Amino acid sequence: MKSVLFLLIICLLWIYSFYHHFIAESSATTMIAFVGLQHSQLFVSTFDGYGDLWAFGHRRRKSLKIRFEKKGTQFDFFQKSNYQHMLVVQELVHIPMMFDSKVLIQYKRGNDTVATLWPRTALGHSEEWLDKNYEQIYIA
């Protein structure tokens, strides 16, 4: 009797784990892509809760909160995904999010762009359209 109960508990834990990892995927609509030079764990502590965290061009580390991929492939992953927005982060600073925007948003500190928010609708447009349809937000 105890072995049957133990087997039942193991099966229930396996079913819950399977569902959690493969079926109930993240409902986040934003991909946060880190391409900067700072440590990836600082990125996790800064942007945890904003969306799904991705690091491009960083050494793989053991982390449950961040996915690591090759440098320069962030737009490929964004095009293949179901995300509505992608925030490309070059420098780790607090960024006020503007998820309802339909245009490209550049977050600037001084004269440097520290992040860029790409809506899915901006991907198919030409450079001329992007040059006319963007906003700049200056942060301290």
Image (spheres, grey):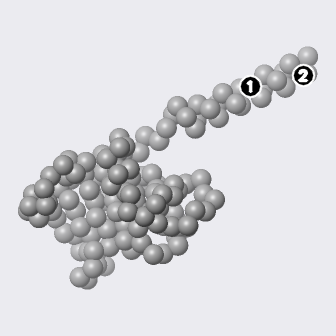
**SS category of the residue bearing label 1:** helix
Count of residue discs? 2
How far is the residue under mark 2 from the one under mark 1? Answer: 12 Å
> How crowded is the residue under tag 2: few (<14 C-alpha within 10 Å), some, or many (20+)?
few
Please indicate whether residue 14 sits to the left or right of residue 115 in the image.
right
Q: Which residue is mark 1?
A: 11
**SS category of the residue bearing label 2:** helix
Picture residue at 71% right of the left edge, 31% below the top: 13
> How crowded is the residue under tag 1: few (<14 C-alpha within 10 Å), some, or many (20+)?
few
Q: Locate the N terminus by quadrant.
A: top right
Where 8 falls versus 23 (above or below)?
A: above
Q: Measured from the top left, where is residue 106 in percent x and y?
A: 23, 67
Q: Measured from the top left, where is residue 28 in percent x and y?
A: 41, 45
Q: Measured from the top left, where is residue 65 in percent x and y?
A: 55, 54
Residue 56 figure quarter = bottom left
Identify the amino acid type marked 1.
Cys
Residue 7 figure quarter = top right
Identify the amino acid type marked 2.
Ser
Return the mark for residue 41: none
Picture residue at 90% right of the left edge, 22% below the top: 3
Return the mark for residue 3: 2
Please indicate whether residue 62 sits to the left or right of residue 107 in the image.
right
Whichever of callouts 2 and 1 sits on the residue coming sooner in the sequence is 2
Is residue 47 in view from this perspective?
no
Q: Locate the C terminus by quadrant.
A: bottom left
Q: Measured from the top left, where is residue 55 in percent x and y?
A: 47, 61
Please indicate whether residue 74 sits to the left or right of residue 53 in the image.
left
